[in-house]
Image: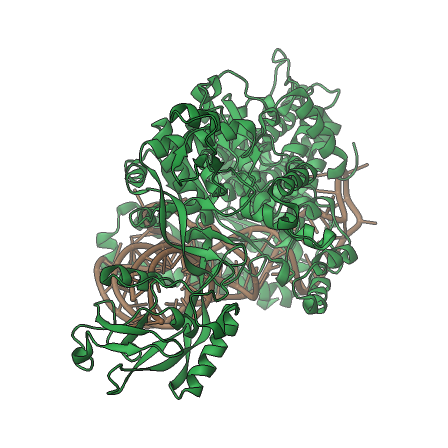
Chain colours: A green, B brown
Amino acid sequence: MEKTYQPSAIEQKWYQTWEAKGYFKPSGTGEPYCIMIPPPNVTGSLHMGHGFQESIIDALIRFQRMNGKNTLWQVGTDHAGIATQMVVERLLTQEENCTRHDLGREKFIERVWQWKEHSGGTITKQLRRLGASPDWSRERFTMDDGFYQAVQEVFVRLYEDGLIYRGNRLVNWDPKLHTAISDLEVENREENGHLWHFNYPLSDGSGHLTVATTRPETMLGDSAVAVHPEDERYRHLIGQNVKLPLTDREIPIIADDYVDKEFGTGCVKITPAHDFNDYEVGQRHALELINIFDENAHINANAPDAYRGMERFAARKKVVEDIQALGLLEKIEPHKLKVPRGDRSGVVIEPYLTNQWYVKTATLAEKAISEVENGNIQFVPSQYENMYFAWMRDIQDWCISRQLWWGHRIPAWYDNEGNIYVARNEDEVRQKFSLADDLELKQDEDVLDTWFSSGLWTFGTLGWPEQTDELNTFHPSSVLVTGFDIIFFWVARMIMLTLYFRKEVPFHTVYVHGLVRDKHGNKMSKSKGNVIDPIDLIDGIDIDTLVKKRTTGLMRPQDAPDIEAVTREDYPEGFAPYGTDALRYTYYSLASTGRDINFDVGRIEGFRNFCNKLWNASNYVLMNCQNKDCGTSDSDPIALSLADRWIISRLQQTNAAVIEGINSYRFDLASQALYDFIWKDYCDWYIELSKPILNDSDSTEETLRGTRRTLIRVLESTLRLAHPLMPFITEELWQRVKTPAGAAGETIMLADYPLPEAKLIDANAEAELDWLKDVITGLRNIRGEMNISPGKKLECLLSNGSEVDKTRFENNQQYLVKLANLDSADWLTDREDAPLCATALVGSLEILVPMAGLIDKDAELGRLNKEIQKKEKDKERVEAKLNNEKFTAKAPAEVVQKEKDKLSELSQALDKLKEQQEKIKTL
RNA sequence: GGGUGGUUAGCUCAGUUGGGAGAGCGACGGCCUUACAAGCCGUAGGUCACAGGUUCGACCCCUGUACCACCCACCA
């Protein structure tokens, strides 16, 4: 066996074997368990968030698979309309200096498909590197033929049921991408702006009104000025007109509750075509909608000549200058305001009047709310339910059309008279509506919002609208593992659409995980230069390559030197090849619920070391068990030592804790329990305790068999226990361990997951071993504090011990000799005879190590003093408690008794320590 | 403006029915001890954000405050 753990040597090998053998497929027997992957963008690559999410899914899947469930992990990718189209457009610009319009729709879409074929495998290859075990034979894509069918079906049926309609109203318009986007795709960020105060002259020449605006350019589209109906300042002006400067129009002064008297001047310019609030006001007062922008948000022909064709911010500047020139600029104030920006393009979004398709959400949401209320769907952690309810109860109709080319084209056709025909395809349209063959029909140019198709993910991937076996078996899926950032985008819509078309929930549990951030809690982003590629953590990367990766392709190239400096400071050596198992374990250890996780590379190193620890422990076990009698035949007599019984007992408890952790999505607790068991219990104590037995020529065959069997079987169980979290190393080791352990099977992946057995929990063995650990630790402590070399054998004297202590000492001499390097132990009949000694207390037992020639007395006095102070502080606290009558009167009897026991123990210990202190002082 | 989460060791974080504050990393000291120096042994370090309250007893429950993060909302 290789001396150190080399992840690269085992990971690829095992993954290929697993996949080739078809282990990832559902077994076909057992209770169904299914997780649908949140489909990553087909042209994307794996980032830390994916790594985290897929590691969690894989742990759940492997765990349930080993539990005997009929397990399906459905995998696939999303066409991600806007994101993908933007990537390909950028490529076109960079490489061929042309736009999609130069190519035309058909050619452009061809290019996107080419790009998809080219890069579409990247993320799925990277998923394999993570050890993910989805059923690759069922891989889907949100624009494959099956999804095409499902999407057409859903659209047509919703339309026929009156839940999809076409409407002309204000939408969020992205002037860069030339498409409508939904409310959710708009990010409102606070920015520094100005509040411009303009004077609008009254038409009768009697004065002016001052309006305050953050968007001066929209005044060209003003239809009115509004004041509050009860505002004394302006009441008398209601119904009069003002002259709209820079135009030849006159507009009315209207009264509306919408106006806040306290804000600004109390006069609001109303621009119904370019502001959502103004639109509402306009509706109420039947105001004219004057659209002054084209699709680029450049000024159009509805505005005066002087501004036509101007870009909106240039127009703003000119409007302000012109108003000022007219002497109508009252003042300009600095003002913080929320600016709506497109989450993809980053440009300021315009409210813009267009025809779009909408899904009526009110009735869909009702059912979606009640299914969460009644517990058919549960969020973990549950506070996300509140967020879900809040949004769902105030849900707006969903704008589903996008003016893009990449996506599912809307199955609606128009004739030359503008009649709309909705059906699954053009033939069906003609048939359904009995249209003449020669009637010219044109399909709607728009495509559907990406989330419309991914909303069908749980049932679309299983073959719907066909009634497939898979659909019947695996739907509803078991749990959805996802980030909180797409609860509205995706989770809510899936719930609504699935309930409507399947009359059942899409999943029973939504496990919401946090965002992966850098070690200081900052979001990882290219521009911050703090992005970590999970693959680099697996394979390792040298510092120069890492710097290059982080500094190329920056939006702001001037940041490169800073990013380089910080990167070189943080990771002077780059990343070592930590391997997949260490990466996964790091994710699990950080996966507490309900908060973001800060990823510190320092931690992955610790878990790589943990893998190495497991590796070497296995090496030790194999050295001692391979080709030896491990008592696995069960016919030979066997004797279990104290240590054997103890580690078996601890294994049961660990087993239960790991299962509990996974079942409650507390991967941090599960991984911690396993880590402590393997490193502390098994390696630090059990393996060490096995040495004196295995190396002692006096050990009986029965005892040897017992120890070997325990060593190998506990290891074998532990590997199965750990497999869902660290698949590769456990498979590699299990293949070597299974035969001597008397286990069989082709792969650990399909072995049974261990179940704890209550009857193997041995409280007595645990108590005995705790005592032994205290004795050994006490002796080590003396050795460490007194600077006694580990090679020096200790002799010790014992006093005040009970019969139990004596028995324990005798029974465990073998261990003490080895682990504490104890040469001999003599019982004192009269403690006064003891020479100058260092002391350790275990319960009432006093362990004395004669110090002659070992140390100076000052050091031991210091040590004793520290010990005494600590115990005295404890004692004071306990005494104070017990002296409090209210405590003794009201606290449960067992708590009071516990305190009393504690007090007497502390008093005894203090007496002994003080006695010892006096004795040393006099010497 | 409304809401959610957070504040515990130098750093990153656990602490689930209220009863003696923990881990990993880092720091310090000692060890190449026949599985492992990617290791072993030991040590130090915390007014559990702050202020009240409930309780015999509060990191934990309640109220309020501060700061951080995020979500939602139509204030020109």
Q: Nearer the viewer, residue A343 or A857?
A: A343
Q: Nearer the viewer, residue A593 or A688?
A: A593
A130 left or right, relative to A407: right
Q: Position of residue A532 (x, y in %)?
A: 65, 53
Q: Quadrant of the C terminus of chain A?
A: bottom right
Above or below for A685 versus A920? above
Q: Position of residue A629 (x, y in %)?
A: 70, 18
Say how many tags the image has: 0
Q: Nearer the viewer, residue A182 or B35?
A: A182
Is any atom of residue A283 visible in this view? yes
Residue reaching furthest to the top: A635
Q: Nearer the viewer, residue A446 or A666?
A: A446
Above or below for A244 versus A737? below
- Residue beneath the point at 31% across and 63% down: A288
Is any atom of residue A814 visible in this view? no
Above or below for A262 versus A350? below
Which image quadrant for residue A131? top right
Above or below for A562 versus B3? below
Q: Quadrant of the N terminus of chain A?
A: top right
Residue reaching furthest to the front: A438
Which image quadrant for residue A285? bottom left
A262 left or right, relative to A75: left
Q: Position of residue A61 (x, y in %)?
A: 53, 30
Which image quadrant for residue A424? top left
Q: Position of residue A630 (x, y in %)?
A: 67, 20
- Residue beneath the point at 45% across and 75% down: A193
- Residue beneath the point at 53% across and 60% down: A346
